Image: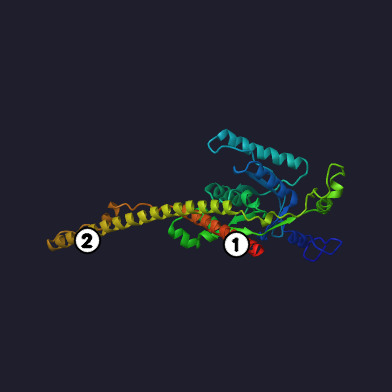
Amino acid sequence: MTSNGSTTTKDGLSNVNVTAALDVEGNVPLESVQLDGLVVLKIIKHCREFFPSPVTGQLLGLDVNGVLEVTNCFPFPGSKADDENEIVDGARYQVDMMRCLRDVNVDHNTVGWYQSTYLGSFVTHKLIETQYNYQQTFNNKSVVIVHDVSRSTHGNLSLRAFRFTRAFMEAQKEGKFTSESLIKNKLTFSTIFEELPITIKNSHLVTALLHSLDDYEHVIPKASSLDKETVVGPLTPNFDTLELSLDPYIEKNLEFLLEAVEEHSQEQSNFAFWQRSVVREQAKMQAALQKRKQENAHRLAAGQDPLPEEDIAKMFKFPPEPSRLDSLLITSQINNYCKQLNQYAGPTLGKLFMAGEFQK
């Protein structure tokens, strides 16, 4: 027993210090996400099986010292948005799945969810509502993992972890996305999401298995019908990353970018129409106020009591400002498309110049 009343272990560490080191109360903010190798494989398998249809799933794990360790996951059953019975069945499936995992002593603490996307088109109202509910329920200790299947087919695994910033959480809690609210919370399209770095961790047994798979002579049985030169090991490097035909990907990305720009232009037109409507109502109110002032001047000259001017403001009803949430989401999506084009245009040009030098 120490002087402050906390018990001491054999190593001389108090339980209070151990609790603080392990962040049992979850006071340390999240700084990174650590995925188990099996979790990554499950996410990729689930997303590829239903591609291009979007799919979602649950992430399970633990938050330790600001690192969100994801050790397990399971997919959600597909459901239609307008079918209440299927939504109820999906919720019951999640509860039953969590109970089964707890019974077999597997990590069953919810730390977030994952979803698939096509060409980075994941900034939607459904994602906003789902992630907001997760962060509200788990005290900002949850993330959403976004896996882009189409981008991963070009040789680069696309896994990104996002969560909402405090500014967006405050605005979403208020339910107002007016110009005044955006200025108050200092909210822009770039401050909606906060991306966390992802690290993939494998156990020693999995690492040993990968090394054994690399030695294909021990994996593939020897047979007279197999030519040793034609046999390719599971982890043998290939030249797929040198493929120059990335035009379909870039072309589709440009199509999505043009559609997003058109949607943003429509939102700007709606906002400009609201501004013109407000200006017209203000002009009418000012004209009515000026008329009332002239009438009161005549009444005072005639020795009569003036009419109240406050009634004029009640006669005019200004149209409510439209929500700026759609504009923010579209702008954020446009930013994602531009980043993707920038990331793929550079390597593609490098490959083209390299191929041109080889042909000389």
In space, the residues marked 1 and 2 are separated at their CA atoms by 66 Å
Q: Quadrant of residue 162?
A: bottom right
The crowd level at tag 2 (other Cα within 10 Å; few <14, some 14-19, many 20+) is: few
Residue 334 spot, x, y in % from top left: 51, 56
Look at 29% across and 58% down and name the residue there.
282
Q: Amino acid at mark 2?
A: Gln
Q: Amino acid at mark 1?
A: Leu
Residue 176 in view here: no
Look at 20% across and 61% down and name the residue there.
293
Secondary structure at badge 1 equals helix
- Relative to 262, 338 lies left or right: right
Residue 221 spot, x, y in % from top left: 86, 44
Look at 84% across and 45% down and name the residue there.
220
Above-or-below relation of 26 to 56: below
Residue 263 in view here: yes
The quadrant of the rendering that contains the N terminus is bottom right
What's the mark number on residue 178? none
Q: How many marks?
A: 2
